[in-house]
Image (tube, helix red, strand yellow):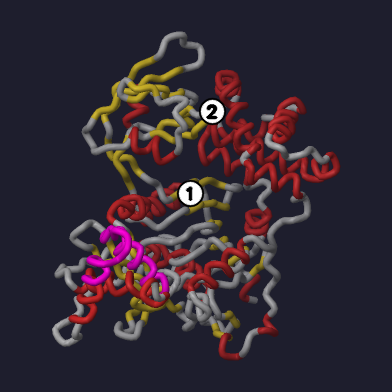
Amino acid sequence: MNKRIIIYGPIILAMIFVLGVLIGLRLNNSYTGKNSVLLNVSDLGFGKLNQVINYIEQDYVDSVKRKKLVDKTLFTLLQDLDPHSYYIPAKELGSVTESLQGNFDGIGVEFRINNDTILVISPISEGPSDIVGIKSGDRIVKVDGKTVAGTKLNNQKVMELLRGEKGTKVKVGVKRRGVTDLMNFTITRDKIPLYSVDVSMMLDSTTGYLKLSRFSRTTYIEFMEHAGRLQEQGMNKLVFDLRNNGGGYLDQAIRIADEFLAKDKLIVFTQGRSRPRKTYYASSDGDFENTELVILIDEGTASASEIISGAIQDNDRGVIIGRRSYGKGLVQEQSNWPDGSAIRLTIARYYTPSGRSIQTPYNEGSAAYHEANYDRMGTIQLELDSSKFPDSLKYYTSSGKVVYGGGGIYPDIFVPFDTVNRTSYYINLIYSGVIREAALKFVDDNRAELETKYKTATKFNEDFLLSEAALNEIINKATELDIPFNLSEYNTSKELISQNFKSNIARYLFGNEGFYKVNNQIDTVVKTAITQNTNQIFD
């Protein structure tokens, strides 16, 4: 078979499929607010292409599954345009968009698979499981009368078992420590919120901390509620953590940026070959215009997170601390198709107020682009060397401070990845999940005692001390997984191991509040943010 036929045949088939369907395309709120226009095929002369497709279907040596071939071809076709245009098959669209919708239908539990059993980490407060009496530490061993424990479970299978339409019921059999018989519950599924704010808390008497994980439909409302509570507690400086926030809806990012910027300050603008420039400005009376602001970024900060970071930096409104952000500055427009699938096509670029394109160049193709970003995330980033930037990549903030283009947002204060005590042994413990699993077992074995002794995350953080026996459990578990013990490296990383162990125990007891109460004490970026005088950066 001619190689060109193998390569281009699926693409030709995809073009016939796409151009042969008449639909109205509706844009999601996350993108530009305009509808796509279908191509006019009246004069393109696709008779030859139809003959080729008929030839393949009639005479190809093996049977061809048309839908599967179309899906793969569309995926490849769009991926080759740029790194962020892509095709979403119907069966995947729900899971892809779910995190941006702000909710899903289910029973409302955070779970982990432990020893091939569904272990409830915590029921969502006032959710369906919480209402019927499901508790942290419960093991779901039966679903609708069928035993599910020990059946080679994975996360996807668990979600298929427990999720369902709002109002439907599911019966679960639960094994609980201290209770001999299996406990049976009937849970009525409901809308379960997916929160954008992981945690908000006061770091000291005047400094608030807010960790945002995504920009969904509900993000602005969540942000205002959490930031407002911090303000009531005496916050006049906010550490806004956007690390590993991959973005989401543009309108939510603009509304949050607006809360920090004075009226008529430019937030972001978009422009594409067939799309005219569109600008977004701050309105009046932002609730946090007088709040000191520090934004934390890293190589996982992308898209909407970069829009906020760039707007704050270019308007000299706050300090950006951390490492260079991802560099995702392409605008996608979503087109939904009758079969339930969707296409997200890049139609413009995002630019910061100074005119910087957020997008990292992808001249060598999408594969090389993703590989380069992956390599950057796995290596130590060096501090910005301004001498390497040509004049064409130098831009200026509203006060005349130089900032740099070329993709992503460069921080005002660079904090390198902490490598001092991160030995190979410690890294193996982290990536193997040994510390996380040891923490889960520790809580599972001692939950009643821990919950009695430590009523709050603050109390736990202040008073809990790890024993050598507990740490030895980590060593033993690692050895079982063929991670050889290294005494020298263990001693070097012992404090990190202990803190990571403690923070995970706190998560299983108190959720994200517990985790960040402990973790922020050893987070060098957070510690830098607390001590930073935001006025110094503009002197």
533 in relation to 40, above or below: above
What type is the residue that disc 1 sits on? Answer: Leu
520 in relation to 340, above or below: above
At label 1, counting other C-alpha atoms closer than 10 Å, the crowd grade (few under 14, some 14-19, many 20 or more) is many
The span picked out in magenta is 54-80
**Magenta span: helix, strand or loop, mainly?**
helix
Q: Nearer the viewer, residue 456 or 130?
A: 130
Q: Are marks 2 and 1 in contact (CB under 8 Å)?
A: no
Name the residue that disc number 2 marks: 115
66 in relation to 446, above or below: below
Count of numbered labels shown in the rendering: 2
Quadrant where the image shows the C terminus? bottom right
What type is the residue that disc 2 sits on? Answer: Asn
Say which quarter of the image contains residue 156.
top left
At label 2, counting other C-alpha atoms closer than 10 Å, the crowd grade (few under 14, some 14-19, many 20 or more) is few
The reply to whether the magenta stretch includes residue 331 is no
Q: Is residue 165 left or right of residue 467?
A: left
Q: Nearer the viewer, residue 293 or 180?
A: 180
Give the residue displayed 34% in from the left and 17% down from the top: 184
Name the residue that disc number 1 marks: 230
Say which quarter of the image contains residue 267.
bottom left
The answer to whether residue 128 is seen in the rendering is: yes
Say which quarter of the image contains residue 380.
bottom right
